[in-house]
Image: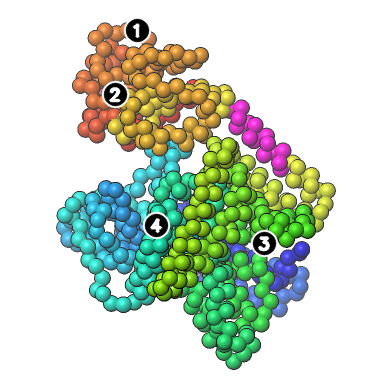
Amino acid sequence: MTLNWRAAPFVRLFPSFALGIGLASFTSFQLSTWTLPALLGLLVLMHRSKLLPNQQWWFGVPLYVFLFCLGYSLYQKQLAHVYPSGLKSREGTEVSAVGKILQAEPGNRFTRIGLRLDALYSTEGSDSCTGGRILLYLPDSTTHFNIGDRLEFRGNIQEIPGPKNPKAFDFAGYMNGQGYYLQAFVKAGEWRHLPRAQVMNMVQSTQQLKAYCLGVLQEHLRTPETYAIGAALITGHREALSPALRSSYANTGAMHVLAVSGLHVGLIYLGLQYLLACLGNWYGNWKWLRVGLLLMGIWGFVYFTGATASVVRAGCMFSFIVIGQALKRYTNIYNTIAASAFCMLLINPRLLLNIGFQLSYLALLGIIFFQPFIYRALYFRSRGLDYCWKLSSVALAAQLTTLPISLFYFHQFPVYFLLSGLIVVPAAMAILSLGISLFILASVPYLGSMLGGLLFLIIKAMNAVIFFLEDLPFSTLTDIWIPLGGILCLFLGISLLAAFLLAPAKKLAYALCCTLLALCMQISWQSWQQYNHREIVVYQVKGQTVIDCISGRNGLRIIDSTTEEKARTWATDNYLSYRGIKQLETVHWQDASSGPDWHFQGGFLQFRDFRLAILGQLPKASTTTLPFDLVLLHDDPDFELSALLAQIPAQQLVWDGSSSYYRARQWRKACQGLGVKGYDVKEQGALVIEL
């Protein structure tokens, strides 16, 4: 297997374009407005020149530079569109604004609204900004909002805060990737819903069609689990998926079937091909009508299912295939993949940083390249075994190329992904076919009920298999934290393996072995660091005090409340996993505990040479003349800091989530006046002290 570079121009052009987008996401340097026109003019001049064969690089180098600058400029232009300077300047002020709803997610207490601003006004009423996006939290979870409705509100806009605890989920980064940098919590009575006029258009027609399909599924899929899986797999509606259901599918390596992707678009394509057979083949007089109807059907399905990265990628690829067949041209699959990615990033360059986009393309490349090699490694005479091995080879190929990025983002590995793949892939094909048939024939007596009952049984059986696999021992390897250098080694190793399969050579085999050795050395170094690491962490948890003393793979946790365990888990679990903590002792801050490296009693901690005091009130008498390295002010103790420092010398004072904002502001001013180091965990995030 070799790649014909002349037949795959987008494979050569895409990397420089993507590199420009990637660099623009990390820097704020602005390119000159004349950069792209100047490079384009140079390319035109080079193209008209009669270059000799050994001078072709004179045209190639400016072309790659142009594509790099194009990607860089497109990202910056889109950033300016979703986060214009006028909106940025209004951060921290109270404004009135009106805009169009882009997304609406109802919750228990709030409805989260993604709004594209049409106009933004200051409190004085002067127009200060147009355009941009903002995230709103409305104290209403009952109102139904449609995409495209308008909303008017008044509130204080703030930057979406980043994570306050180490290794915690970066919600700000997640929303930045969708184009939201500011947020506002709107009070009751400070907003007004402006529904659209009831004029039938494409958006409303699609919403009504989707509502009909979901209603049909809800009628025939009688349990929440079956409805949630059916809605996600068939229509792309994932709001009904519970966290437990998502976790079960993720832990068994079956989450990919719930993302509408190439499998779904391929079945739609085959179905349309069958229905349009009456228009003749690709060489008849009706071929362009056939092409138009196929493209309308494919992109109608893409739009219907929410236009996620995976389904848009599949839509682009099948579009290129349809057009290529109509033009009677050979389509190079790698060129088609690169062209679809190029077109998607041309429209939305921020997709490059989207996890779904990355996983989708890596999985597809793995299936196309590695699956034939894996499949040919074993031969089975039995058709049944051969079919199972073919499905397994697809799963192995996709898992191989997505492994580095999966470990980097999710830090876990589903052990039984091969078993789940043998079940969920055929089941997903049956569910999708039955679901589409049910939408068409739901009103037919007996037949609709029969299709709905069969669909219910298949989804229920698939869920039962997933739950069974999840309950097996060692179903998921968790707490896998590979350093960035290790992730790069994995990608390099996969690339070297691909090169070796194409052209076996000793040098490539040696390079692959050296890469794997470097990966093992990095993992060993990280493990050694974990065993010899000592630190104290004061977390930011709303209304609580949570302190971890980490000593190698063991730790002591000091808390002030045995309730709100969910909040503590959310704030701390990722960091404990990152540090490789295997044993954690939990103690109340007024109790006692002793270990090899620490002694804690009544709010006073000796951790090796580090001394910590947790004070909820002023001590009656000084217990020691030695200074404390850290004093934590718990809750809202009513004493002056000068009186505290007179009794207990402290190098640094800290207050956390148990303290009120009013007291935190007072202590901040007092520390400045006394010349003492003060640290506000609520404001500055978790305090991490390495010993």
Answer yes or no: is residue 230 visible: yes
* Disc 3, SS: helix
In the image, residue 390 sits, relative to residue 434, either above or below, namely: above
**SS assignment at label 1:** loop
- Residue 523 drawn in magenta: yes
Q: Which residue is mark 1?
A: 624
Q: At label 4, which amino acid type do we have?
A: Arg
Tell which circle, 4 or 2, labels the residue nearer the N-terminal end: 4
Q: Residues within 10 Å of mark 1 (few under 14, many from 20)?
A: few
Residue 491 percent location from the top left of the image = 65, 49
Whether residue 21 is visible to the viewer of this picture, yes or no, is no
Disc 3 vs disc 4: which is toward the camera?
Answer: 4
Relative to 308, residue 53 above or below: below
Depth order, front residue of 100/10: 100
User: Which residue lies at the image location 31% right of the left edge and 54% below the top edge?
Assistant: 106
Q: For mark 2, give the secondary structure.
A: loop
Whichever of labels 2 and 1 marks the residue nearer the N terminus, that label is 1
Amino acid type, callout 2: His
Q: Which residue is tagged 4?
A: 222
Task: Give the number of the mark in front: 3 or 1.
Answer: 3
The residues tagged by marks 3 and 2 sit, at their Cα atoms, a distance apart of 58 Å
Range drawn in magenta? 515-529
Q: Amino acid at mark 1?
A: Thr
Neighbor class of circle 3 (other Cα within 10 Å; few <14, some 14-19, many 20+) is: some
Viewer-nearest of discs 4 and 2: 4
Frontmost of labels 2 and 1 is: 2
Separation of disc 2 and disc 1 at Cα? 20 Å
Give left or right: position of 542 versus 168: left
